[in-house]
Image (spheres, grey):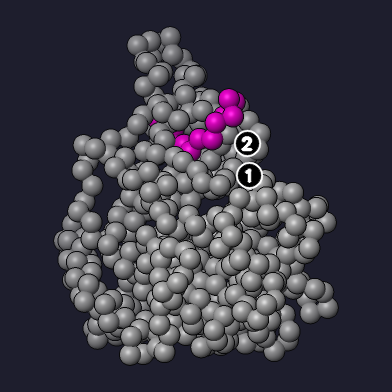
């Protein structure tokens, strides 16, 4: 079959899947094929990663002028850099001359980027400043028109830097919407906010990026099963795992396409997500409301996902069974790297005002639990890889295999939404629910079925940093 015919056939199959999913998601079903299909992946790169706000990095990763890291939007490489004036920039990692990659080091500090092909040279704000043999071959070249390409919009929230390729995307604050109320509890606990500790860890998993993103919206029921060995050895606490049906479990969904789950105690205890007394004392100055502070005080675990692929988990873990648990915030992105494959990025954060000793302990606790060799992480990678394998089978296609996301739905679950919930979204007081996962897939379906972007409005902003 000719290549264009294959593409058309694949596109038609995606259309059919998405049309069927409109009905299926309302009864808690998701077609298995969406977790490992080349045509689905291709459309995601354009409709999801090409049009949503995507997390790039944290401002504390580039504290000095010239600091940079190479990051991705979908599968496209970008340079995350602070220019000489102190402004944060996001620049396509591609020379405007012949398109070669200009930055071949993952991180560093530089005032200029020089292409290894023909040595076109750019300042770290993206402006073109050097073209060899210009007087002989490029006398009329306007350098101001040939700077590095930037995304359509770049913005930040509490240090989190996002970018979107879509000039028609809403402002970042509107995109995050009501979910900012929950992000504040993770990022604005103290007056100084959070800072990244060390370098992010990266590793490849034979699983679809959506498996990680959906899991962190509130798949509480898997903890008792997938991570059973951690509970039995004492590395993880029962309260953090959340038994199905326990009242301290909360799932908050329908929050502008984003979702979060929490485990909070109701017995008068105040674990403060596992932070020690000296750090707890800093929280009153963070500017949170009394309702937000209450959820932090009683909090055992907060985990959520900002659509599409930025997730977080805020809790305490043990480096080993002989040591006490230490609190930390882990940010993670699920980067698509082809059908049924992803690259996981994981950052560790702690309050800026915390002691160096606490930050070292937080980093060790995070690495022991949520890193390539982490106890939690290895469990998750095994089961997520199985989802991708099943999704890529011939049986999944021929039988139209559907996956079940019905836990906690009316008639299935015993929980009722809280009518006096102080925050945005809908809160369900149970661990036995998948409302956040259904929120994620409804948002994904909405994004995948948007009318294609207007190419005239999506013109690249050449030369802008």
Q: Which element type, helix, strand or loop, lies under badge 1?
A: helix
Residue at x 37%, y 43% (from the top left corner):
171
Residue 138 located left or right of residue 212 = left
Q: Residues within 10 Å of mark 1 (few under 14, many from 20)?
A: many
Quarter location, residue 105: top right
Residue 210 visible in the snapshot: no
Q: 122 and 179: which one is in front?
A: 179
The quarter of the picture where the C terminus appears is top left
Residue 440: percent from the left, percent from the top? 38, 68
Which residue lies under the disc numbered 1? 61
User: Residue 199's spot in the image, x, y percent?
Assistant: 66, 52
Residue annotated with mark 2: 67
**Residue at (24% x, 37% y) in the render:** 457
Above-or-below relation of 450 to 302: above
Q: Quadrant of the N terminus?
A: bottom left
Camera-nearest label, 2 or 1: 1
| Residues shaded magenta | 83-96
269 relative to 174 in the view: left or right = right
| Percent position of residue 15, x then y | 19, 66
365 w.r.t. 233: above or below? above
Check contact, mark 2 vs mark 1: CB within 8 A.
Answer: yes
| Earlier residue among tags 2 and 1 | 1
Q: Is residue 320 magenta?
A: no
State the image quarter where residue 17 is shown: bottom left
412 vs 425, nearest the viewer: 425
* Residue at left offset 47%, top offset 24%: 127
Q: Is residue 84 magenta?
A: yes
């Amino acid at each position: 079959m000719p290549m264009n015919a294959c593409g058309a056939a694949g596109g038609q199959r995606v259309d059919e899947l998405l049309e069927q999913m409109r009905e299926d998601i309302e009864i808690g079903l998701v077609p298995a094929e969406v977790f490992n299909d080349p045509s689905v992946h291709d459309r995601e790169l354009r409709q999801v990663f090409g049009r949503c706000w995507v997390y790039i990095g944290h401002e504390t990763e580039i504290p000095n002028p010239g600091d940079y890291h190479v990051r991705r939007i979908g599968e496209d490489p970008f340079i995350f850099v602070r220019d000489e004036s102190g402004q944060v920039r996001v620049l396509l990692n591609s020379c405007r001359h012949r398109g070669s990659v200009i930055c071949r080091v993952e991180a560093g500090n530089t005032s200029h980027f020089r292409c290894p092909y023909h040595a076109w040279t750019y300042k770290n704000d993206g402006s073109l400043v050097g073209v060899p043999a210009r007087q002989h071959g490029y006398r009329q070249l306007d350098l101001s028109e040939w700077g590095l390409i930037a995304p359509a919009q770049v913005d930040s929230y509490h240090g989190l830097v996002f970018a979107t390729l879509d000039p028609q995307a809403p402002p970042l604050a509107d995109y995050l919407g009501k979910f900012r109320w929950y992000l504040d509890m993770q990022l604005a606990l103290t007056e100084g906010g959070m800072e990244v500790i060390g370098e992010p860890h990266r590793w490849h998993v034979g699983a679809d990026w959506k498996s990680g993103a959906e899991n962190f919206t509130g798949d509480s029921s898997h903890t008792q099963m997938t991570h059973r060995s951690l509970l039995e050895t004492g590395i993880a606490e029962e309260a953090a795992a959340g038994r199905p049906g326990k009242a301290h479990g909360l799932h908050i969904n329908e929050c502008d396409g984003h979702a979060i789950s929490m485990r909070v105690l109701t017995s008068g205890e105040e674990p403060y997500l596992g932070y020690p007394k000296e750090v707890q004392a800093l929280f009153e100055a963070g500017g949170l409301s009394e309702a937000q502070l209450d959820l932090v005080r009683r909090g055992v675990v907060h985990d959520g996902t900002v659509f599409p692929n930025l997730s977080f988990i805020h809790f305490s873990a043990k480096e080993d069974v002989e040591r006490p648990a230490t609190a930390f915030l882990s940010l993670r992105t699920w980067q698509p790297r082809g059908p049924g494959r992803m690259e996981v990025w994981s950052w560790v954060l702690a309050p800026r005002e915390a002691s160096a000793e606490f930050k070292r302990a937080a980093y060790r606790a995070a690495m022991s639990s949520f890193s390539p060799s982490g106890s939690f992480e290895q469990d998750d990678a095994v089961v997520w890889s199985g989802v991708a394998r099943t999704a890529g089978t011939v049986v999944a296609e021929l039988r139209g295999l559907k996956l079940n996301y019905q836990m906690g739905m009316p008639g299935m679950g015993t929980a009722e939404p809280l009518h006096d919930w102080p925050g945005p979204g809908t809160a369900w007081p149970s661990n036995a629910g998948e409302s956040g996962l259904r929120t994620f897939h409804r948002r994904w379906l909405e994004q995948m079925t948007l009318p294609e972007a207007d190419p005239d409005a999506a013109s690249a902003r050449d030369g802008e940093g």
